[in-house]
Image: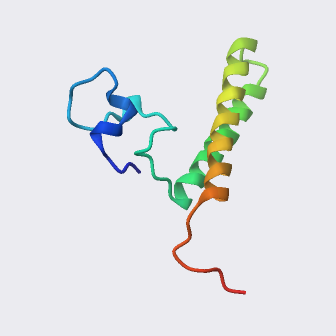
Amino acid sequence: MRVYNRDRALCHRLDVADAPRPDRCRPSCVNVARTGHRSGQLLQHAQTLEKQAASEAVPGPLADRLSRRAGQLSALADRHVHDRINAREPTT
């Protein structure tokens, strides 16, 4: 999910359009707002990439890129879990 503010959007560094560009989305953009559901999807995608990287059919350089990307996605999901703001106080 994005909270779109064109002046802060990293996807518009070189573009003059006045709409978000999902194809140029950057995870470090201040316009990104992750939900718990999205965080889970990031972890699932990271696991899929790791499985692909582990396949013997995948060339070494591609496997390395897949593993790096999986690590980045896992780190984003972990950061969300640790930095998230809860609407309610947890009950004990």
| Coloration mode | rainbow
Q: Quadrant of residue 10?
A: top left
- Front residue of this view, candidates 55 and 30: 30
- Write the residue at 67% across / 21% down: 65
- Count how many numbered circles sit on residues in the image: 0
Q: As displayed, is residue 89 above or below residue 52? A: below
> Is residue 33 shown left or right of residue 51?
left
Q: As displayed, is residue 37 above or below residue 1? A: below
- Write the residue at 31% across / 46% down: 4
> Is residue 90 shown left or right of residue 13?
right
- Write the residue at 21% across / 25% down: 16
Q: As displayed, is residue 81 above or below residue 60? A: below
- Image location of residue 84, percent across then percent down: 58, 61
- Write the residue at 73% across / 87% down: 92
- Front residue of this view, candidates 39 and 6: 6
Q: Quadrant of residue 14?
A: top left
- Front residue of this view, candidates 55 and 60: 60
- Image location of residue 70, percent across then percent down: 67, 34
Q: Is residue 23 at all visible to an observer of this figure?
A: no
Q: Is residue 85 at all visible to an observer of this figure?
A: yes
> Is residue 39 shown left or right of residue 31?
right
Q: Residue furthest front?
A: 7
- Front residue of this view, candidates 40 and 85: 85
Q: As displayed, is residue 29 above or below residue 52? A: below
- Image location of residue 28, percent across then percent down: 51, 38
